[in-house]
C-alpha cells in the first residue's frame, strides 16, 4: 500500500515537473569550477582593477573588500533560492517563482541582454591581450574576437562533463599564475598603510587628493562586477548530481573561491607595485608591476595566461548562458516556433545545440562590429538590478506559506536585506544613460509579457524541478515528503 502511494505521488510529481533532458553527470565540485571559470580570475584582476584605480585611487582595496562582503550576501541568496529551485534558467527562474512572472520576465530580458555582452566583451579584449605577444592579433582584434566565440561555442557543443574538464584545466593554470604573482607581490611588499588603508587619489590637476564619496561608491560598484560569475553554478543545477542537496554549497564555494583568487592577488599587486604614483598614473599599472618584478618575458607569460583566462571565461559563459536561452525555449517564453527550436537537445551529447548556435551567432555579430566600451557601459546597472532582485527573493521565499526544502542561510534576513539596500544605493550613482537603457529593456519585456505571454496560457510555463532532484535528502536538513514516502 505504501509503495503504491509513493508511486502515484511520484507520478503526480512527474506530470508537474520538467523531464531530465540534459546530462546529469556533474559532481558539485565541477559546477563550482564552472562558477569560478565564469569569473575569469586573472583576467578580471588585470582588466578591471586598473580601471578601478583610475576611478577611486587607493580606495580600490577597500572598494574590493566591501564588494566582497556584498558578494557573500549575494552568494547566500543564490544558495538559498537556487537550492529551492534547481533549474537551468538561473536568475529568471528563481525570481519568477518567488517574486512572480512579471518580475521574472524582466529579469529574463535584462539577463538575456547582459549574457550577450559578457563573452563578447571578453572576446574583444582577447585580441589586445594576445597582441602583446603577437602583434597581428592586436591589429585584428575583431577577427580574434570572432575566433574566440567560435572556440567557446565548439566546447559548448561537447558533453558537459568534458566541457568542465577544459574549464578546470584553465582555472588551474590561472590559480598557479595567481599564486606566483601573490608570492612575488609579498616579496616586494611596501607599507600597507599607504597601499591598502589609504583613500588617496590622483586629482584632475595631477596632484594627490582624497577620493570623493561619489567615486568611492562607483568604485564599489565596479568591484562588485569584478567578482560576478559565481552565480552560474545554479544554471548547471540540472546537470549536477544531488543538486537540491548540494547546489547551495557549490554556490557558496564558488563565491568564496572567486573572492579569494581575485582579492588576494590584487592585494599582493598593490603592495608590491614600485610606487603609489605608478599605480595611479600608469596606463597599465598591474602589467607594469609584473614587468618590474620579472622583466618583459615574464610579462608576456602573464599576458598569455590572461588570454587563456579570457578563453575560459568566454567558454564557461557560453556554456551557461546558452542553457538559459534553452530554458527559455522549454518554458515557451519565445513565440512557439522559436521556443521549439531553442528547446532542442542533442540526443547523443545532451547539450542544447540550437541555443548554443543562436547565442554564438549573436555574440559573433557583436564581436565583429562593436568595441568593448560600447557594449559594456550599462552592465553594472544590470548587475545591480539582478543582484537586488535575488536579495529580495531570498527574503520573500521565507515568507511563503510552504516554501520548498532548501539550503538556509545564517543570519537571515540581514544578508539579503543589506544586499538590496546596497544595490539601491549604488544604483543611484550610475550614469543616467545606462539607467535609461536598462529601463527600456525592462519595460519592453514587461509589455511583451502583458501583451503576448499573459493572455496565452500555453506560454511562460514554470514547472517544478526535475523529480530526480526532488527525490533526495537536503543539505539543509530534513527530507522531502515524496522521498520519505518512497523510503517507506
Image (cartoon, grey):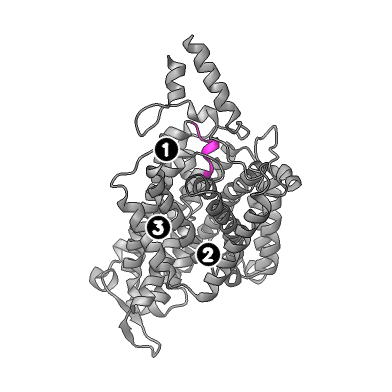
> Residue at label 2?
379
Residue at 45% across, 22% down: 483
What percent of the width, then of the height, locates residue 39? 48, 54
Farthest bottom residue in view: 205
Q: Are marks 2 and 1 in contact (CB under 8 Å)?
A: no
Task: From the image, state whether disc 3 or disc 2 is nearer to you.
Answer: 2
In primary-sequence order, the first of circles 3 and 2 is 3
Residue span colored magenta: 235-241
Question: Can I make out residue 213 in this image?
Answer: yes
In this view, the residue in front, 311 or 420, is 420
Location of mark 1 (residue)? 403
Task: Specify the farthest residue to the front.
Answer: 455
- Residue 130 is situated, as x and y percent measured from the top left of the image, at 58, 64
In the displayed structure, does residue 42 sit left or right of residue 364? left
How many numbered circles does the render carry? 3
Q: Is residue 236 magenta?
A: yes
- Of labels 3 and 1, the one closer to you: 1
Amino acid at each position: 500500500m505504501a509503495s503504491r502511494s509513493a508511486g502515484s505521488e511520484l507520478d503526480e510529481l512527474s506530470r508537474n515537473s520538467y523531464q531530465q533532458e540534459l546530462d546529469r553527470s556533474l559532481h558539485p565540485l565541477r559546477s563550482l569550477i564552472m562558477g569560478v571559470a565564469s569569473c575569469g580570475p586573472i583576467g578580471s584582476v588585470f582588466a578591471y582593477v586598473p580601471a578601478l584605480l583610475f576611478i577611486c585611487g587607493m580606495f580600490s582595496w577597500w572598494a574590493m573588500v566591501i564588494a566582497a562582503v556584498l558578494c557573500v550576501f549575494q552568494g547566500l541568496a543564490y544558495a538559498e533560492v537556487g537550492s529551492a529551485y534547481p533549474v537551468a534558467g538561473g536568475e529568471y527562474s528563481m525570481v519568477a517563482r518567488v517574486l512572480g512572472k512579471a518580475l521574472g520576465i524582466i529579469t529574463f530580458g535584462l539577463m538575456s541582454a547582459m549574457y550577450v555582452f559578457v563573452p563578447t566583451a571578453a572576446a574583444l579584449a582577447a585580441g589586445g591581450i594576445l597582441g602583446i605577444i603577437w602583434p597581428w592579433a592586436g591589429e585584428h582584434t575583431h577577427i580574434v574576437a570572432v575566433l574566440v566565440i567560435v572556440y567557446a561555442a565548439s566546447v559548448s557543443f561537447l558533453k558537459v562533463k568534458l566541457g568542465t574538464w577544459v574549464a578546470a584545466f584553465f582555472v588551474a593554470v590561472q590559480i598557479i599564475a595567481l599564486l606566483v604573482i601573490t608570492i612575488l607581490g609579498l616579496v616586494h611588499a611596501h607599507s600597507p598603510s599607504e597601499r591598502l588603508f589609504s583613500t588617496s587619489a590622483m586629482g584632475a590637476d595631477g596632484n594627490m587628493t582624497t577620493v570623493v564619496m561619489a567615486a568611492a561608491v562607483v568604485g564599489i560598484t565596479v568591484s562588485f562586477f569584478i567578482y560576478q560569475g559565481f552565480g552560474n553554478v545554479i544554471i548547471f543545477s540540472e546537470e549536477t548530481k544531488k543538486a537540491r542537496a548540494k547546489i547551495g554549497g557549490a554556490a557558496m564555494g564558488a563565491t568564496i573561491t572567486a573572492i579569494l583568487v581575485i582579492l588576494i592577488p590584487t592585494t599582493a599587486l598593490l603592495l608590491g607595485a614600485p610606487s603609489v604614483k605608478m599605480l595611479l598614473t600608469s596606463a597599465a599599472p598591474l602589467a607594469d608591476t609584473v614587468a618590474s618584478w620579472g622583466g618583459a618575458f615574464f610579462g608576456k607569460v602573464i599576458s598569455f595566461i590572461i588570454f587563456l583566462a579570457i578563453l575560459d571565461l568566454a567558454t564557461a559563459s557560453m556554456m551557461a548562458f546558452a542553457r538559459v536561452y534553452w530554458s527559455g525555449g522549454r518554458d515557451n517564453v519565445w513565440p512557439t516556433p522559436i521556443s521549439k527550436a531553442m528547446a532542442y537537445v542533442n540526443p547523443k551529447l545532451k547539450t542544447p545545440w540550437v541555443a548554443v548556435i543562436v547565442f554564438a551567432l549573436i555574440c559573433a555579430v557583436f564581436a565583429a562590429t562593436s568595441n568593448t566600451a560600447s557594449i559594456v557601459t550599462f552592465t553594472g546597472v544590470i548587475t545591480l538590478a539582478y543582484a537586488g532582485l535575488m536579495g529580495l527573493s531570498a527574503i520573500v521565499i521565507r515568507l511563503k506559506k510552504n516554501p520548498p526544502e532548501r539550503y538556509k542561510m545564517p543570519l537571515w534576513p540581514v544578508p539579503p536585506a543589506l544586499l538590496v539596500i546596497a544595490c539601491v544605493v549604488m544604483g543611484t550613482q550610475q550614469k543616467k544613460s545606462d539607467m535609461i537603457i536598462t529601463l527600456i529593456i525592462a519595460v519592453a519585456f514587461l509589455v511583451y509579457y502583458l501583451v503576448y505571454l499573459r493572455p496565452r496560457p500555453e506560454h511562460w510555463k514554470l514547472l517544478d524541478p526535475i523529480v530526480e532532484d526532488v527525490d533526495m535528502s537536503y543539505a539543509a536538513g530534513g527530507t522531502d515528503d515524496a522521498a520519505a514516502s518512497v523510503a517507506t
